Image (cartoon, grey):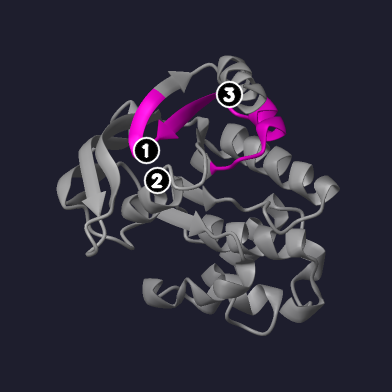
Amino acid sequence: MTESLPLSSSAIEIKDLSFAWSSGNKVLDHCSLSVPRGEFWMLLGTNGSGKSTLLRLIAGLLAPQVGSINIHGGLGIVFQNPDTQLVMPTVGADVAFGLVSEKLTPSQVRHRVTEALTAVNLADLIRRPIYALSGGQKQRVAIAGAIARQIEVILFDEPTALLDPDAQLDLVAQVRELVKSRGLTALWVTHRLEELDYCDGAFLLEHGRLVDRGNPERMRQRLMKEIES
């Protein structure tokens, strides 16, 4: 089950989580981890290790078959391809779209949108058509949409996979700054070892199990040895 709980030192708590597709292929096997509140952690592993499936379970897009997922705070997610989640014609309209259910006044909506876009350095593009944005800018709009909803936990499913090298590092640096300045908790799926420079810690999955966690540099060295062997 997935539920929101009172204040805890962990923003995400996963216990004994297992998941298999209908074909019987097991993706996660008794996986447990916790992400500290107010920190930026990364989730690593080779293709097929279960990274993206785990993120989708945390986001509630899939239902766990065994185990529990507890989220302490509002949750947002940024996907690999921002075009799958940007639905309105302009930057400001897209950020405002996620606020429809909150029954805010027009003034409150404008304030939330402006504040969120300022946080990702896009306030001057509030009227820009979505189609005219770069890939990195689109990802920032997706992040702004989560910030506008005042979420506390944000998930990233390989958000730099479609970006050029400069935009990749700009985005991960921006997310680190948001985590530190706004007290967000972030869990970021990646296979880019250079992105480990920006996180507080990392988890390593192998065959659906958590096999290591903690220091990013130790994780980098372990993965580099595996690549070289």
Where disc 1 sits, the SS reads loop
Q: Nearer the viewer, residue 193 or 139?
A: 193
Badge 2 marks a residue whose secondary structure is: loop
SS for dot 3: helix
Residue 199: percent from left, percent from top: 60, 29
When the figure is inspected, residue 77 is found, relative to residue 138, above or below; the finding is above
Instruction: Determine the residue positioned at 70% across, 65% down.
Output: 138
**Hey, which residue is sitting farthest right in the picture?**
166
Q: Earlier in the sequence, mark 1 or mark 3?
A: 1
Give the image quarter of residue 88. Answer: bottom right
Marks 3 and 2 sit apart, C-alpha to C-alpha, by 18 Å
- Callout 1–callout 2 Cβ contact below 8 Å: yes
> Is any part of residue 5 visible from this angle?
no
Which residue is found at the position 36% from the left and 29% from the top? Answer: 210
Which residue sits at x=34%, y=50%? Answer: 58
Amino acid at pointer 3: Glu
Which label's residue is closer to the chain start, 1 or 2?
2
Q: Which class describes the residues within 10 Å of circle 3: few (<14), some (14-19), or many (20+)?
A: few
Res. 54 visible in picture: yes
Label 1 vs label 3: CA separation? 15 Å
Residue 5 placement (x, y as % from top left): 22, 42
Q: Disc 3 marks which residue?
A: 226
Does residue 202 show up magenta in the picture? yes
| Front label number (3 vs 2) | 3
Residue 110, image x and y in percent? Answer: 61, 71
* Magenta stretch bounds: 189-211
Alpha-carbon span between mark 1 and mark 2: 7 Å
Q: Say which of marks 1 and 2 sits in front.
A: 1
Foreground pick, 98 / 80: 80
Label disc, if present, on residue 207 of the rendered structure = 1
Image quadrant holding the C terminus, namely top right
Q: Earlier in the sequence, mark 3 or mark 2?
A: 2
